[in-house]
Image (spheres, rainbow, N blue to C red):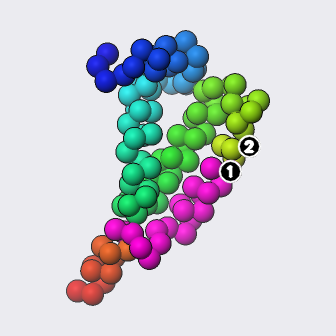
Amino acid sequence: MPFLSSGARYLFKSEYSVPLIPWELAAYLATAAELVLPVLLVLGLATRLSALALFLFNIIAVVSYPVLWEGGYYDHKLWGIMLLVIVIYGQGRISIDALICNKHHQK
């Protein structure tokens, strides 16, 4: 499988138990989500959609990898709450979404 490290292949095949989809597809989707969605969130582009996708990705990570319950569950709850705030309130004033909205409303 191109573009996936042997470590990622091992983790998705042996450690993570992602429900409903094959591990190969889960590995590619997770890699894409981890690389693309945070960048969109920082830029403020498709902010609510990116935050919602990361929120769902966070839930899937906790469900798929039970080891997180021991040490990382608090962190995942905190990240989930922060992402939900962005989903509810949307982008800030300094974001590409805000620029697009301002230009659209000026016409």
Residue 65 figure quarter: top right
Q: Where 2 sits versus 97, above or below?
A: above
Pointers 1 and 2 in contact (C-beta within 8 Å): yes
Q: Is residue 73 magenta?
A: no
- Front residue of 74/100: it is 74
Q: Is residue 9 visible to us here?
A: yes
- Picture coordinates of residue 40 (x, y %)? 38, 54
Q: Which mark is residue 74?
A: 2
Where does label 1 land, which residue? Answer: 78
- Picture coordinates of residue 60 (x, y %)? 57, 35
Q: Residue at x 50, y 52 (%)?
A: 52
Q: Is residue 94 magenta?
A: yes
Secondary-structure class at tag 1: helix
Query: What amino acid is labelled 1 in the image?
Result: Leu
Task: Tell me: 106 left or right of 36.
Answer: left
Q: Where 18 sits versus 57, above or below?
A: above
Crowding near the residue tagged with mark 2, few <14, some 14–19, many ≥20 C-alpha atoms within 10 Å: few
Query: What amino acid is labelled 2 in the image?
Result: Tyr
Secondary-structure class at tag 2: helix
Name the main secondary structure of what is drawn in magenta: helix
Tell me where the magenta segment starts and ends, as one range: 78-97
Crowding near the residue tagged with mark 1, few <14, some 14–19, many ≥20 C-alpha atoms within 10 Å: few
Q: Where 75 sits versus 84, above or below?
A: above
